[in-house]
Amino acid sequence: MTQQKGNPLDMIWAMALIAAGIGVFFRIPQIMPDILAVEYFAGSAFFIRLSFYCMALILVGGGLKKIWNRFWKA
């Protein structure tokens, strides 16, 4: 096992990023009807949904990258 390095708060931040990404991922189907109810956003449903999924992936990816750098990067 490699030696741990860095601030212990980084691990808490990584877990928070992952939890936020998972939360966004599961919340998208519930909030899309509310967003599409606004007339201004009705025509861009695909772009809004894509943006939310990209945001969720970026959050989870950022958290996983922090964990990867802490434990496995030399």
Image: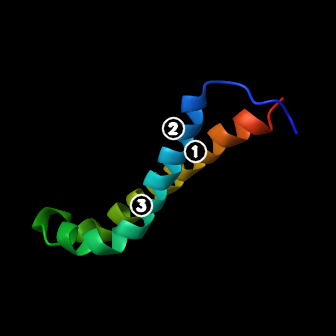
| Furthest residue toward left | 39
- Which residue is the site of mark 2? 13
Pick the front one: 42 or 4: 4
Amino acid, disc 2 = Trp
**Residue 61, position as x, y percentages in the image:** 59, 49
Task: Tell me how the rendering is colored.
Answer: rainbow
Mark with earlier residue (2, 3)? 2
Residue 32 location, quadrant: bottom left
* N-terminal label among 3 and 1: 3
Element type at mark 1: helix
Where's residue 5, x and y in %? 73, 26
Q: Is residue 53 above or below residue 2?
A: below
Mark 2–mark 3 distance (CA, rounded to whole Å): 15 Å
**Residue type, label 3:** Gly
Residue that label 1 marks: 63
- Ranked by sequence position, the earlier of labels 2 and 1 is 2
Q: Is residue 47 above or below residue 18?
A: below
Estimate how packed mark 3 is, as few (under 14), some (14 to 19) or many (20 or more) residues with alpha carbons within 10 Å. few
Label 2–label 1 contact, CB within 8 A: yes
Q: Secondary structure at mark 3?
A: helix
